[in-house]
Image (tube, coloured by chain):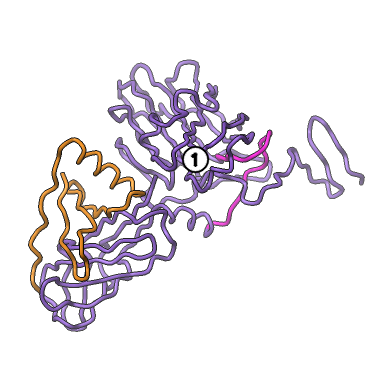
Amino acid sequence: MYKLTNLGFGQTEITSVIRLSDGACIPFDQANMDFVEYNKWLSLGNQPLPPDEPTLS
Amino acid sequence: MSLILDGTNGETFPDGSLQAAAASPYVLKNRIINGAMQIWQRGTSFASTAGYTTDRWSTIGYGSYNETVSQSTSVPTVTTGNAFPYSLKVQRPASSTGTVPVLIGQAIESVNCYDLSSQTVTLSFWARAGTNYSSSGSTLTTQLVTGTTADQGITSYVTWAGYASPIFNASTILTTSWQKFSYTATLGSGILEAAIIFYFTPSGTAGADDSYYITGVQLEIGTSATPFERRLYDKELISCQRYYQTYTQPPLRGVVTATTFSTRMAMVLPVIMRAAPTAVVGALPMYDGNATTTVSSVSATYLSAQTVEFDFNTAGSLTAGRPAIVYQTGSSSMTLSAEL
């Protein structure tokens, strides 16, 4: 299972997803093997969880 | 003393030194990274799960996993002493009755193997069996598998174009003593990925040491195995860090942000990675010059092969507008992986 990260300051699109099993932040980079696995997971019809609401400082 | 050419033993030079094999004309000839099992960034003992172990060497399961991997100080003794610091011990756990192949392999990145197309290459390595090695005939299957698509990853090597017909698929017969083995073959054209694979199929119930040990793994262009290429430790580490980096309290520096995000922190990587890395961030200790807290979660990322940058949520409050650092306390870590 995965969860999208937030849209960060200066970002116009979300750039990574968090693998919930180990908390790994996976960048949206086609050369990243974990992103390749994530895309396979998506191709099976799965959908990631929406991002958390960011906390305030 | 004159130069002695001996077809059996090699060449003896005037200073008495013996060179048993032709010198390779290639600089940095060995395409295997960490072939001497020097670098262990992830630890020195690995449970029965899929994934990377000693740097660049990965287990691969066939639907299930039935092996442990560990660092061993059992190494071959050669004429100049112990040539290798460690070997890689790949073991079916004691008392296991599983019979899935016990496998370890290394994928070679496209940029480091494309020039092997149509070349004759030689793989050489040292190996020995554990005292309870259960492989039929004491064989260790040794394969060189190639593909024509760049960098599909070691875990999917069974889908590579060349999987069904490995460049070589040798049955290396092990004993409990260290031996050096080599295999030579010619690759096809258009090679964009390659992998060295070692495995055995266990049988019966595993004894205390149902394992094989390997070290000194070298893949080079040429028709014979030349002496193992010894690279200095720092050079080998840099090669490994292209794929994986680990830090205790990484030198992340940044600023406590005003409203939406707690803290933005970044660092330049000492070695450019193969691709934007997957980051696993622990509860890093943070300090803004006034208060301390820890990272509770990652809100957003800005990851590249050269730099990592995060928006962190924190467990406690820091003061907006202050600089912030990850400071030196405890043992929380960050790992970055851009493995194949």
Which quadrant of the figure contains the C terminus of chain B? top left
* Quadrant of the image occupied by residue B63: top left
Give yes or no for residue B223 being in the magenta stretch: yes
| Residue under the point 42% across and 50% down | B40
- Left or right: residue B237 versus residue B119 is left
The relative height of residue B241 versus residue B160 in the rendered view (above or below) is below
- Left or right: residue B166 versus residue B9 is left
Q: Label 1: which residue?
A: B192
Q: Which chain appears purple?
A: B
Q: Colour of chain A?
A: orange
Residue bounds of the magenta highlight: B217-233
Q: Looking at the image, which residue sits at the far right?
A: B2
Which x, y percent locates residue B286?
Answer: 21, 72
Which x, y percent locates residue B56?
Answer: 44, 45
- Left or right: residue B165 versus residue B232 is left
Which one is in front, B49 or B113?
B113
Chain for mark 1?
Answer: B
Which one is in front, B216 or B222?
B222
Name the chief secondary structure element in magenta.
loop
Q: Looking at the image, which residue sits at the far front?
A: A12
| Residue under the point 78% across and 42% down | B18
Which x, y percent locates residue B7?
Answer: 82, 31
Q: What amino acid is at disc 1? A: Leu
Give yes or no for residue B236 being in the magenta stretch: no
